[in-house]
Image (tube, helix red, strand yellow):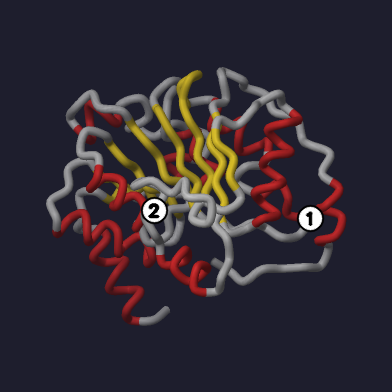
Amino acid sequence: MGKNKLRKFSENLTFRCMVQPAFDEIFRKDHPLKGRWREDFFGNDRPIVLELGCGRGEYTVGLAAAHPEVNYIGVDIKGARMWRGAKTATEQGMDNVAFLRTRIEFIGSFFAPDEVDQIWITFPDPQMNKRRVNKRLTAPGFLERYAQFIKADGIVHLKTDSGHLHEYTKAVLAANGIVPSVCCDDIYGKGIADAKLSIKTTYESRFLAEGLPITYLQWSPGGRKIFAAPDFPADELLVGEHTPVR
């Protein structure tokens, strides 16, 4: 492991905004902050918004800077990347930002029913291989995890450069009777990019420079807890295909 990564891991331990539980703290058990993020971490009763797969935390920090009346939590497993967002939040004295280092498969160990108001999924790995479809962050198994803690009228946002993931997620929603409140295949080309949607991560800037359209979906689970898999024939074309690691 490079010295730069070791330095970041070490510095992460000094950030109050960084929560890094050990595996045995959460495997088949609940973390002490579950149901108590407002009281024990933020010290307020503001809404809680998650960014799943937050990477460097640019979107989490951007949203938090624009909306100090909301608590934002960026979730990812890659500590060396999250260091950037945690350091920025610390240097700027932002008290409405947290970073949670964990696998999203374990997300249910951290949040209680109705504890989360919104979820952002920004530029996740589209898992462009049919054999990895269940790893997509909008696959039914993940939506069922989110449904355990997001409010019935909560909102989920998906912002991605992957047209395939965009269409797949539309198919998942349709298979479960969910009509997106916003569905756009090119937020900049069609002029719907408001202040929130215009926050740009490193990945997004790269994709825009390559001329890729940025897509967006917004929906509410409406209290649904169980999600069926869609019939999505386009996945049949993806066997053996891969995309770069994000």
Tell me where residue 22 appears, x and y as whole percent. 40, 49
Q: Nearer the viewer, residue 60 or 181?
A: 181
Image point (43%, 49%), residue name: 193
Q: Tell me the quarter of the image containing the N terminus.
A: bottom left
On screen, residue 167 versus residue 218, left or right, reads: right
- Dividing the picture into quadrants, the one containing residue 55 is bottom left
Q: Earlier in the sequence, mark 1 or mark 2?
A: 1
For label 1, the residue is 131
Image point (72%, 68%), residue name: 242
Residue 21 appears in the picture as rendered: no
Q: Could you classify mark 1 by the number of other residues whose Cα lies within 10 Å: few (under 14), some (14-19), or many (20 or more)?
A: few
Tell me where residue 245 appears, x and y as whole percent. 58, 69
Q: Could you classify mark 2 by the number of other residues whose Cα lies within 10 Å: few (under 14), some (14-19), or many (20 or more)?
A: some
- Dividing the picture into quadrants, the one containing residue 116 is top left
Relative height, residue 200 to residue 157 (above, below)? below
For label 2, the residue is 198
Residue 173 appears in the picture as rendered: yes
